[in-house]
């Protein structure tokens, strides 16, 4: 379907193999969810649990809602793993053990910890209806999504480069708001996850940089195509019980924008980051189509900035239509949490 893609990936097999140990972390020494959650086999673990629950009570409902949405997004990892595994040249019958396949599995192993850690924190917080959250997570994996990358590794790694940065922004901002509320433990958790996302973003950006070096015109056209379609979030079909596909995600986006956790301005800044790091403006020797793509991409952040006010106005209108009484089924009434027994 995409002439030349397999040749490019095969050419980079050794490069990826040589860099796996620097792009990823050894599972035996890497951080794990249990490092940041109470150990309930000890008395000190119950004290840590009390502290966690006190921190959870400090969070606003908006911040808690975005945290739940971020956790659900992370928990849908099986979907994302399948998206990457079918990219042309990543895993094929003739190359079942390619370095690209090794990267995908190891990346999934690192990502898997994020959902586990946030899930445990939310379960222990006493503020979340975990069964409704679990229904949403299963529904999201069931419904899948459409990244519009086809089975093209060029488009696929534009998408993952963008998404890893976007996820980092969201986790960092949730952590920032948690710290402002006094939830220092949650701040450390979000920062730790964001650090992983930053490292993964560097890896995907490096892969696409190599695509640009080896197949400049086609890689540039793939970048243009993804930005014309606009990057959609992986949890685009998120829904609660009884809701239409994607309905809950739209509400989630509204709250993320209103709280400043992830906004249209962040989208533009990520695009500017990719254009700059990939040196798009200075690529030379392009075909006419690729030169047109170069001009489109370099002018896109400016065009987005001009319509930012209109986008903000639409968000405000959407908030007003949602009404002040809309509540996610994930969030329990604050009230007084059930007290922990004395030790």
Image (cartoon, grey):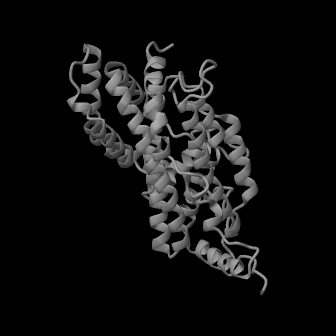
Residue 149 rendering spot, x and y as whole percentages: 50, 26
Q: Is residue 101 left or right of residue 154?
A: right
Residue 275 rendering spot, x and y as whole percentages: 30, 37
Q: Nearer the viewer, residue 47 or 263?
A: 47
Residue 120 rendering spot, x and y as whole percentages: 68, 62
Residue at image position (63%, 61%) is: 33
The image shows residue 123, relative to residue 8, as above or below, that is: below
The answer to which quarter of the image holds residue 212 is: top left
The answer to which quarter of the image holds residue 11 is: top left
Residue at image position (59%, 22%) is: 95
Asked whether residue 320 is in view, the answer is no
Q: Is residue 101 left or right of residue 177?
A: right
Residue 283 rendering spot, x and y as whole percentages: 23, 27
Quarter containing the C terminus:
bottom right
The answer to which quarter of the image holds residue 335 is: bottom right
Q: Is residue 24 left or right of residue 54?
A: left
The image shows residue 67, relative to residue 178, as above or below, that is: above
Q: Nearer the viewer, residue 113 or 115?
A: 113
The image shows residue 70, relative to residue 212, as above or below, that is: below
Q: Nearer the viewer, residue 42 or 68?
A: 42
Residue at image position (49%, 47%) is: 318
Asked whether residue 295 is in view, the answer is yes
The image shows residue 177, relative to residue 196, as above or below, that is: below
Q: How many marks?
A: 0
Kindly give the residue lying farthest to the bottom in the view shown: 342
């Amino acid at each position: 379907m995409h002439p030349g893609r397999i040749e490019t990936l095969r050419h980079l097999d050794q490069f990826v193999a040589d860099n796996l140990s620097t792009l990823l972390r050894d599972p035996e020494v890497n951080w794990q969810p249990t490092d940041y959650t109470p150990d309930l086999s000890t008395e000190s673990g119950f004290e840590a649990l009390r502290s966690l629950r006190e921190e959870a009570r400090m969070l606003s409902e908006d911040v808690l809602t975005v945290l739940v949405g971020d956790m659900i997004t992370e928990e849908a990892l099986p979907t994302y793993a399948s998206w990457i595994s079918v990219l042309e040249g990543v895993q094929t019958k003739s190359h079942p053990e390619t370095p690209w396949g090794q990267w995908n599995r190891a990346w999934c192993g690192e990502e898997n910890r994020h959902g586990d850690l946030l899930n445990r924190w939310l379960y222990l917080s006493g503020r979340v209806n975990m069964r409704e959250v679990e229904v949403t997570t299963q529904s999201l994996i069931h419904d899948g999504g459409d990244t519009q990358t086809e089975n093209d590794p060029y488009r696929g790694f534009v998408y993952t480069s963008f998404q890893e940065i976007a996820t980092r922004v969201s986790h960092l901002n949730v952590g920032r708001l948690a710290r402002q509320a006094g939830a220092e433990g949650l701040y450390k958790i979000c920062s730790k996850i964001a650090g992983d996302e930053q490292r993964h973003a560097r890896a995907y950006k490096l892969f696409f940089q190599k695509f640009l070096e080896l197949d400049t015109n086609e890689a540039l056209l793939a970048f243009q195509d993804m930005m014309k379609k606009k990057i959609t979030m992986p949890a685009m079909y998120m829904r609660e019980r009884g809701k239409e596909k994607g309905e809950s995600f739209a509400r989630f986006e509204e709250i993320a924008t209103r709280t400043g956790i992830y906004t249209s301005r962040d989208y533009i800044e990520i695009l500017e980051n990719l254009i700059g790091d990939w040196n798009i403006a200075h690529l030379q020797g392009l075909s006419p189509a690729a030169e047109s793509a170069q001009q489109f991409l370099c002018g896109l952040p400016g065009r987005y900035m001009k319509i930012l006010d209109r986008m903000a106005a639409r968000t405000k209108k959407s908030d007003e239509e949602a009404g002040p009484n809309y509540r996610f089924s994930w969030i329990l009434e604050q009230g007084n949490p059930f007290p922990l027994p004395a030790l």
